[in-house]
Image (cartoon, rainbow, N blue to C red):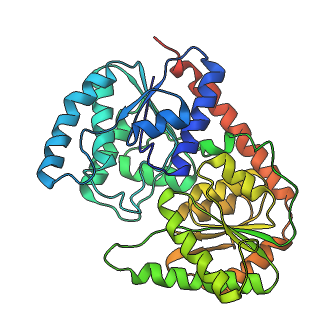
Amino acid sequence: MLCYGFLGMGNVGNEASLTAFLNQLRAVQPQARVWCLGMGAEDVERRHGIPARRLTTSRPGSSRVARLFARLADIPRTWWLIGRADTVVVPGMGVFETSLGGSNPFGLAYWLAVVAVGARLRRRRLLLISVGADRSRPNPATTFLFRHTLRLATYCSFRDEVSARAARKMAGTSLAVPVRPDLAFALPPPECSGPRAPGRIVVGVMRFGPRDDPSVMGQYRAKLVRAISSLVHEGASIRLVIGDVADLPLADEIADAVRSYCEVDEARVAVSHADNQNDLMAEMAGAEVVVASRYHNVIAALRVGVPVVSLGYAGKNAALLERFGLAELDQPIEEFDPDVLLRHIAEARASSRSQLRRVLAQMQESLREQELEIAPLLEST
């Protein structure tokens, strides 16, 4: 069995999706031989203990001509690798999202299409399980590739209604797309999480914005420093977390700025180096509130029953919070208001957690139903 996607890149959410799928697979097919095609093969092997290969023959920093030849070389290489598996699985992840640079037709859209065509011609099953989609920045070529990938899949489910609607629109057909929660909701809670600490707030930071316009990040950083400083002056202790290793330098910058302005030490404003979903959940379990932008930061908080305030970069955060009865606690990350953020945090602190537990139970039941649906498709032929 082959797991496929942008894995081994330091993105906590993508790795959480793979971990959740492997847990499920080992429960229903303990003898299954599973390996991975990802962007960072060594990292996948270290984190998940399965053999891995690079998703593409191209290397970071390659010239445009070299990348072109690599894309061409990926076709026969992928054809050969698919022949070594009976099933290809894309376990979660926002593989049909066009935000954050995902509209490039020569990136994941191209590789997914190559896999889909290869799987169909080689009579292999292609399963897209609880994946995400959006139409925020549609590109005709990307939409074309996504459309045919969706049509060629053996099974496809989406993690929310927003994704399902986007998929139907891209497919251009009455595509049957069951809605199933994100796979990360199936991960068990951490075993060693402590009790809730009064005044503790976890803030997830995110590096985003165009590389040629640093003012976007500058404004975001300044507003977050302002909001966190207000919380510290009110007596809160802050723990900054990340959702991707690329976020860590920004977290350090924000923490340094707040500590300097408020004249406090790391006991009041600290940066967590947690780089997997289990450790993130452990960080969040003792918090009164979590502020998050990355989707799987939001999931980590909800999984341990902590109210979330979202500074979202796509509709997926808003859709998830609406499901948990927290729809009013969301702002767009590009233009959020620090005063509104502080008000949302106060509202989240006062909210009931019983609704979160009830919805979480429903989502986990839905994931169990999906396990039964796909179990026959995971059997080796």
Relative to 266, residue 57 above or below: above
Is the C terminus in the top left, top right, bottom left or bottom right quadrant?
top left
Residue at position x 35%, y 61% from top? 101
Q: Position of residue 224 (x, y in %)?
A: 60, 80
* Count of all numbered marks drawn on residues in the image: 0
Residue at position x 41%, y 65% from top? 136
Rendered image quadrant of residue 265? bottom right
Q: Position of residue 37 (x, y in %)?
A: 38, 34
Is the N terminus in the top left, top right, bottom left or bottom right quadrant?
top left
Q: Is residue 314 visible?
A: no
Q: Position of residue 61 (x, y in %)?
A: 24, 54
Residue at position x 20%, y 42% from top? 71
User: Viewer-proximal residue, 57 or 155?
Assistant: 57
**Residue at the limit of the structure toward the left, as seen here:** 65
Q: Is residue 249 left or right of residue 136?
A: right
Q: Position of residue 4 (x, y in %)?
A: 42, 35
Rendered image quadrant of residue 329? bottom right
User: Viewer-proximal residue, 285 or 368?
Assistant: 285
Q: Is residue 1 left or right of residue 321?
A: left
Q: Is residue 108 left or right of residue 335?
A: left
